């Protein structure tokens, strides 16, 4: 059981690229800003160069003639129509002569004597040189340069957008080359899945030696569908087939085909298959194919629905394969029930490989693979960890080993110990400890009795899983929990096991009602889980004598055949009978639990008191308390005898 922060509980039933020079969305704005900065800089340089004469005083030509007559002028430099005048005292001024008229003629017109003019050093400079032409052409060059630069930046953006438009329909598949040793995965890197690997060895053999199959008239399946729960290693196994065969591996997600515009997905499918044919032998892997492979005819857009167009193109490409093209399509999904029948017919995805959750031996092998690069202490026992993780997928086991290494590194240790692995199991299942979440004394007492109620009921009922740990330490979203693990992996569950699980879920509810004479929000999640289980027994598993062997709901709890949530295939009378049967199952379980709590009240108080003291009780200590009070703990041989 697990108790959430609002004191609601839930029973735990464990069952066997594109590159760019600018950040995304900022390229165009960044280039505009850069252009403006360059323009401002050039304008500033030009203003400095062109305005150097503003600090020099400009005088009229008549005043200059008077200064020359008085003998105050030392020299004059003539540059075109501009006169740079230097006085005897070192001062400088500028003036302008008449255009097209010689300077001597101008001074003669002002009646300047030849003696006074002879005292002035007159120097004539031609209108040429870099600075002259720069100053003359700068007012034209700078604006033109700015416009050209601005248009260049715009053209880069337009070119990029044009290239994106041309590549919009191209496939986004990621290719793994057979020569890339760093990413190569073989069957040795995939533990468990023995039957699945045997099925796929034929595909590897065909890719390595297709002539052997073609000479005898055999045709290898074009499509292989990998089915299984999330985390069971479907993608990893597909990569292992490519690595084992030494062929190119194209991987893409089903959602990457779907776009807002109709036809884009179909175009990407064509491009993907064209690339694979060019590099054949090759494997195309489509992850989560149910994103585009769902049953057709349910889309809003009908025949123009983008998802359906993409699926139609996939079907056409699968039919278009020739026996000697050596291109195999692999796909993965955890919802094979929603796939279109045309996708599963012979000649397309006609070979289906199921990947189950690993059993105890497989879990041990998976743990050994993930332990390759981790230094372990001498006390590590991976067999024990495999036994305590029934229902864990391969991804869960990877996370477990990684969390154990993180815990060891956080505590500045160089080796991973068994204690780290044990703690990481609960961290993966429930989340990290919340040491700051401190319960009040009253809440702590109520939580202790609540969890003790679950544990007592689980220990007394013959078909309930044995208790491995009881804790009232907050972890993740729970404030307390009882860790129940089956003695052995199970593929099937019986009606008696379901009834005992419902009773165990009601243990906390009955304890609160019996011991404290009141109810809290704590058992709310327990009631939800147990009620849902009781309804599944009636509507899905045919475990109701009154309703009989009828499946009235699908695997997801909704009506069968993809009907709407509000649509039902049974009448209101049958619905009322279902509700009555669910109520009877819950009430029968409630009576059983009330009897157990009343009979073992002393043991309940002992366990709850111990929980308040130490906050956590492990399996060994819990079984010692049971034996001291006359309760025999469950053993493996007892379970086998009951079955």
Image (cartoon, grey):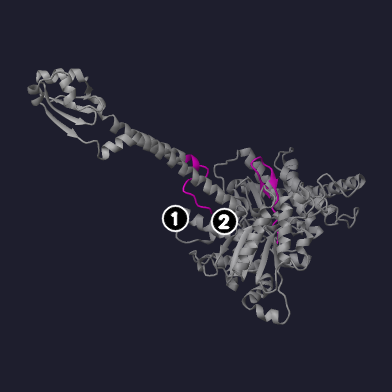
Q: Which mark is residue 41?
A: none
Q: Earlier in the sequence, mark 1 or mark 2?
A: 1
SS for callout 1: loop
Count residues near mark 1 (Cα–Cα under 10 Å), then give few for <14, some for 14-19, many for 20+.
few
Which mark, by number, is residue 424?
Answer: 2
Please tell me which residue lies in front, 17 or 588: 17
**Membership of 23 in magenta stretch:** yes
Label 2: which secondary element = helix
Identify the residue position indicated by label 1 in the image.
412
* Neighbourhood count class around disc 2 (C-alpha, 10 Å): few under 14, some 14–19, many 20 upward: many
Spatial CA span between label 1 and label 2: 17 Å
Residue 526 screen position, x and y as percent = 73, 46
Query: If the image is split into quadrants, where does the C terminus sit?
Result: bottom right
The residues colored magenta run 1-30
Residue at horizontal 53 percent and vertical 43 percent from the top: 25
In magenta stretch: residue 340? no
The answer to whether residue 15 is left or right of residue 281 is: right
Q: Is residue 365 visible?
A: no
The reply to whether discs 1 and 2 touch (Cβ–Cβ < 8 Å) is: no
Could you say where residue 279 lies in the image, as x and y percent from the top left?
59, 68
| Picture residue at 23% right of the left edge, 22% below the top | 58
**Above or below — where is 226 with respect to 430?**
below
Report x, y in % for residue 13: 71, 55
Q: Nearer the viewer, residue 319 or 146?
A: 146
Front residue of 267 and 561: 267
Q: Main SS of the magenta segment?
A: loop
């Amino acid at each position: 059981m697990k108790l959430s922060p609002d004191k609601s509980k839930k029973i735990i039933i464990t069952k066997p690229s594109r590159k760019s020079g600018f950040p995304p969305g900022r390229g165009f704005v960044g280039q505009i800003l850069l252009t403006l900065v360059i323009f401002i800089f050039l304008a500033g340089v030009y203003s400095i160069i062109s305005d150097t004469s503003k600090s020099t005083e400009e005088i009229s030509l008549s005043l200059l003639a008077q200064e020359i007559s008085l003998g105050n002028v030392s020299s004059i430099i003539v540059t075109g129509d501009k006169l740079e005048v230097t006085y005897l005292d070192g001062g400088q001024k500028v003036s302008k002569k008449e255009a097209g008229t010689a300077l001597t003629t101008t001074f003669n017109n002002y009646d300047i004597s030849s003696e006074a003019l002879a005292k002035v050093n007159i120097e004539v400079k031609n209108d040429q040189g870099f600075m002259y032409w720069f100053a003359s052409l700068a007012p034209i060059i700078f604006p033109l340069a700015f416009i050209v630069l601005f248009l260049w930046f715009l053209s880069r953006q337009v070119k990029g957008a044009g290239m994106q438009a041309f590549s919009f329909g191209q496939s986004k598949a990621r290719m793994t080359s057979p020569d890339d040793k760093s990413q190569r995965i073989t069957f040795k890197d995939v533990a468990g899945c023995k039957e699945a690997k045997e099925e796929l060895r034929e595909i590897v053999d065909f890719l390595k030696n297709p002539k052997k199959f073609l000479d005898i008239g055999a045709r290898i399946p074009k499509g292989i569908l990998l089915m299984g729960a999330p985390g069971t290693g479907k993608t990893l196994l597909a990569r292992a087939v490519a690595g084992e065969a030494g062929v190119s591996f194209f991987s893409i997600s089903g959602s990457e085909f779907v776009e807002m515009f109709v036809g884009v997905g179909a175009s990407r499918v064509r491009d993907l298959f064209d690339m694979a044919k060019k590099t054949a032998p090759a494997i195309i892997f489509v992850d989560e194919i149910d994103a585009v492979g769902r049953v057709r005819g349910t889309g809003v857009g009908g025949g123009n629905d983008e998802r359906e167009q993409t699926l139609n193109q996939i079907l056409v490409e699968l039919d278009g394969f020739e026996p000697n093209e050596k291109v195999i399509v692999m796909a993965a999904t955890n919802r094979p029930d929603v796939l279109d029948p045309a996708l599963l017919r012979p000649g397309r995805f006609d070979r289906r490989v199921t990947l189950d959750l690993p059993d105890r031996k497989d879990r041990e092998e998976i743990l050994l693979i993930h332990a390759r690069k981790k230094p372990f202490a001498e006390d590590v026992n991976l067999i024990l960890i495999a036994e305590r993780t029934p229902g864990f997928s391969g991804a869960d086991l990877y996370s477990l080993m990684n969390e154990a290494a993180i815990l060891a590194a956080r505590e500045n240790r160089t080796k991973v110990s068994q204690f780290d692995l044990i703690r990481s199991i609960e961290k993966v299942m429930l989340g990290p400890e919340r040491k700051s979440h401190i319960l009040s004394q009253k809440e702590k007492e109520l939580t202790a009795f609540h969890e003790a109620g679950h544990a007592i009921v689980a220990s007394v009922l013959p078909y309930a899983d044995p208790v491995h740990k009881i804790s009232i330490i907050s972890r993740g979203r729970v404030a307390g929990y009882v860790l129940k693990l089956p003695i052995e992996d199970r593929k099937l569950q019986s009606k008696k096991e379901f009834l005992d699980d419902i009773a165990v879920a009601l243990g906390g509810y009955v304890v609160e009602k019996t011991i404290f004479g009141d109810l809290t929000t704590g058992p709310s999640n327990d009631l939800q889980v147990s009620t849902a289980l009781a309804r599944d027994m009636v509507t899905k598993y045919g475990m109701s004598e009154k309703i009989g062997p009828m499946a009235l709901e699908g695997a997801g709890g909704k009506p069968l055949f993809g009907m709407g949530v509000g649509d039902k295939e049974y009448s209101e009378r049958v619905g009322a009978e279902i509700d009555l049967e669910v109520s009877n199952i819950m009430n029968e379980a409630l009576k059983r639990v009330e009897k157990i709590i009343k009979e073992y009240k002393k043991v309940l108080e002992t366990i709850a008191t111990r929980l308040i003291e130490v906050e956590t009780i492990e399996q060994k200590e819990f079984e010692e308390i049971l034996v001291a009070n006359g309760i025999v703990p469950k053993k493996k041989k007892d379970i086998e005898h009951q079955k």
